[in-house]
Amino acid sequence: MNKGAAYMTEGPLLKKIILYSIPVILTGTLQLLFNAADLVIVGRFSGSLSVAAVGATGSVTNLIVNLFIGLSIGAGVMVAQGIGAGDVEGVRRTVHTAVPAAAIGGLALSAVGISLARTLLDLMGTKPDVIDKSVIYMQIYFAGMAANMVYNFGASILRAAGDIRSPLFYLTAAGVLNVILNLVFVILFKMDVAGVALATVLSQTLSAALIVLALMHREDACRLYLRDLRLHPKYLLRMLKIGLPAGLQGSLFSISNVIIQSSVNSFGSVAMAGNAAAGNIEGFVYTAMNSLQQTAVNFVGQNYGAKKYKRIGKITLICLATVTVVGVTLGVSGYVFSRSLLSIYITDSAAAIETGVIRMSLICLPYALCGIMDVMTGTLRGMGASLVPMIISVAGVCVFRIVWIYTVFGMEPYHTLQVLYASYPISWIVTFLAEGIVFLVLLRKKLRLDKAAGICYSNS
């Protein structure tokens, strides 16, 4: 095994967790810049209707994509636990199963997204003045879904093995290409939303190619041999067992967001534009916090595989404290500078900017609550308990928000954007508390059973 195992399973944790998280934050930020560049460029050169058109696709796209992204989480957990346990053959088979699974899943997503784009956008109540552009953007975006999936699976494997820099470097190259192509397609060729979608697909193809080459040149159990690519049933089933609940959770989250997007759509294209711009800004805060979830998954996964269970509690506390600092700092900063940030995206509608400020006051400002919820979810997944956080999250977030929309928000006096957005922070608190209780029960149970069986493991 490589030194990634020793890095995560031995020695002090705080410095390592922070240093591990920083490249993950930067990687996620670059990934978000794909969509941010789309919104900024079409906003400045095509107008707020194009911003609304691109933004309207986000929820429905995530609804379809998140199911397969969850499988990449399963692959990462399996690699992390395998490295911690010293299971070289298990890691090798996981890698060679994950890559073809990603490609096949991506092609299936392309077929679904392209064929159902207009139907899904219609179901969401997308307004007639933006739906044609939304359909074009969504269909082109989904045409490149195989590359998207291969990158995400490959990046998950590399991070689980301790390589956090390569995904950052590859996304840097892809991000630069994306911005250049955006400018060429939108300004020079006047392609509007079709141009930014095509730029995103081509840049994602570059990042996928680079991630595959990185796996092919590794010198450990994660090395990829194209001739050995196949779906190993045992490992695919375990990947599904761990990853499918995470994917279902993400998709069900997206269902609640689709319903919320539909509710936003009912307020018109001005609200849609403000919501899309604010959501994109908040995405940078979320990505920074979500890096701590990914860190928790991999550190917990490797220590769980190495049977160093007492370190899991320390990892969780450090990640919770760190994500709180990150979330409060960025969330408050985002809200304080909200009007200036929103004006980068929207240049032709003061009303749309004010709508964005409303969203940021109720979602961005208390965003640290979402971060601590996600870290707890990541800890449970790293321990292999993927079904439990899915059930809790679905009940605490998805079901709660849907009930909120059809009860509180549905009443005439409370049918406002403020009441709609208030469902977010309340659901984060409820879900975190429930997951925290489950984590304590599972960890104490594991420690008690191992002590009764006379199992000794390191506390370092």
Image: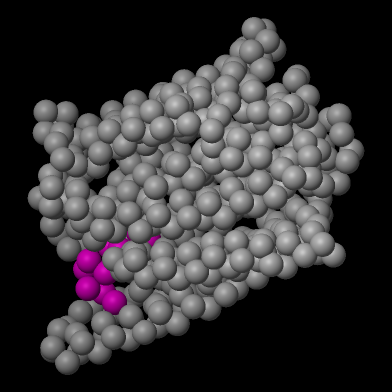
Residue 241 at what x, y percent from top left?
A: 26, 58
Residue drawn at (29%, 32%) of the image: 103
Residue 225 appears in view: yes
In the rendered image of this protein, does residue 82 appear above or below residue 92? below
Residue drawn at (54%, 41%) of the image: 60
Residue drawn at (48%, 66%) of the image: 393
Q: What secondary structure do most residues of the magenta stretch adopt?
A: helix
In the rendered image of this protein, does residue 359 appear above or below residue 107? below
Residue 305 at what x, y percent from top left?
A: 22, 66
Residue drawn at (50%, 22%) of the image: 140
Identify the residue at the far top of this view.
Answer: 189
In the rendered image of this protein, does residue 8 appear above or below residue 212? below
**Quarter holding residue 229:** top left
291 within the magenta span: no
Q: Nearer the viewer, residue 225 or 311?
A: 225
308 within the magenta span: yes
Residue 207 appears in view: no
Q: Which residues are magenta?
A: 297-309
**Quarter holding residue 453:** bottom left
Identify the residue at the far bottom of this view.
Answer: 452
